[in-house]
Every structure is written in structure tokens, then in C-alpha cells.
Amino acid sequence: MRKKEKAEKIAEILNHLYPVPAIPLKHHDPYTLLIAVLLSAQCTDARVNTITPTLFQKADTPQKMVKLPVSTIEEIIRPCGLAPRKAKAISELSKILLEKHQGQVPCSFEELEALPGVGHKTASVVMSQAFHTPAFPVDTHIHRCAKRWGLSQAKNVVQTEADLKKLFPKNQWNRLHLQIIYFAREYCQARKHSPAECPICSWVN
């Protein structure tokens, strides 16, 4: 089966299983989404969702966040890991949003990726989920599935993203990236994965 045909069948299965995939990180606007995504680096979404209500109760805008000492932010987000680095980035990017963007999260990849602690994946999530701009953020789940399904043999997420963008129509990217994450967690885990029982791995190779 050609890669394009595989991709079409995979999209059909994912649309059936997850017709309207919810954004897994709790947030209420682009700023709180940006902070939640930044915190999710090397941390589970579930863990982030237990931490952000406490943080956002104290500060859910750049104006409020810059008034919090970095040590306070660090204390709250410690369970997310990499707390010193993330706390510093949250404080600094909040200042930059006030100084350069009138307190608003910018809606371009270039401006987002220029913010402290914001890499391409974080920017892609914000662009797709907050601003509905076609993007295909690739995390470890998507990287793993793309390889298992024979859609990409890339050694890194950057190349995997490029491979997947060639296979799937642009208007499907935002939904697909969420669908694959949900599928990976439910059926296609890194460990204890049974290819014979997986709705995609059972036929794809």
C-alpha cells in the first residue's frame, strides 16, 4: 500500500474514533494555552492540568504574571519538572508580551518562537489551537506512530513533521495532531503495545 493510501485510511480510522478531539490542556485564552504548553515540555498533560489552576488563580494574564516573583512561579510549577528554567521563561515572556505585543500573544510562528522557552512545537500548538492556523506539532507520540505506521523513517521530529505534512491535506493537520496523540495514548503506547490489537498497526505494515 502506498503511503498516501495508508494516510487516507489512517485518517478515516482516526476521524471515526475521535471525530471532535478536545484540546487536552486546560486553558481559557491564547496566553493560558501558551503557558500550559510551555509547562508540558517533558511533562504529561494530566500533570500540567493539576498545576495550572493554582498558577492561573494567581496570574492568568501577562500583567499579573510579571508581578509574581519568579520564585513563586517556580514553587507552583515544580511538579512539572524543569521548574527553574520554565519559571524564568514564563516571567520573561510575559514581560516581552507587555513590552512588544500590547499584552497579547502574537499570532505568527516567528514572533512566538522568539519568546523565551517557546520552541517550534510550542509555537505550532498555539498557532493551531489558539489561532486555527494549519500546523502539525509533532511530539514523541506522533513521532513514534509515524514510524510504526511507515509514514516516516525520520530520526527527529522536525523531519517527521515535514513528512506528515506532505501526506495529509493542510485542512486536516490541526485535528490530526490531536487525534494521533489520543490514539497513541489509548492504542499505540510506547510500551506494552500489541500490534495485533491496535486498530492501525494490525494492518498497516
Image: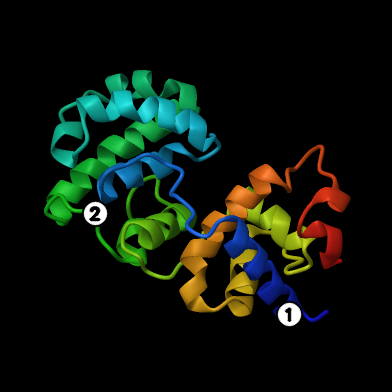
Query: Looking at the rendering, in which quadrant would you find the C terminus?
Result: bottom right
Residue positioned 83% across, 49% down in the render: 197
The first of marks 2 and 1 along the sequence is 1
The label number, if any, that marks residue 95 in the structure image: none
Give the CA separation, mark 2 to mark 1: 38 Å
Which SS class for mark 1?
helix
Front-lying residue, 195 or 82: 195
Front-lying residue, 189 or 197: 197
Q: Residue 102 location, x and y as percent?
A: 11, 54
Can residue 18 be seen?
yes
* On screen, residue 64 above or below 78: below
* On screen, residue 136 above or below 41: below
Which SS class for mark 2?
loop
Q: Residue 140 location, x and y as percent?
A: 64, 49
Which callout, 2 or 1, points to the residue nearer the camera? 1
Residue positioned 21% across, 30% down in the render: 59
Q: Label 1 near label 2: C-beta < 8 Å?
A: no
Q: Residues within 10 Å of mark 1 (few under 14, many from 20)?
A: few
Q: Which quadrant of the structure image shows residue 179?
A: bottom right
Label 1, on which residue? 5
Tell me: 202 left or right of 161: right
Q: Residue 191 location, x and y as percent?
A: 79, 38
Q: Residues within 10 Å of mark 2 (few under 14, many from 20)?
A: many
Amino acid type, residue under disc 2 in the picture: Val
The label number, if any, that marks residue 105 in the structure image: 2
Front-lying residue, 87 or 152: 152
Colouring chosen for the image of the structure: rainbow
Residue positioned 22% across, 35% down in the render: 60
Tell me: 75 left or right of 153: left
Q: Which quadrant of the structure image shows residue 27?
A: top left
Tell me: 85 left or right of 14: left
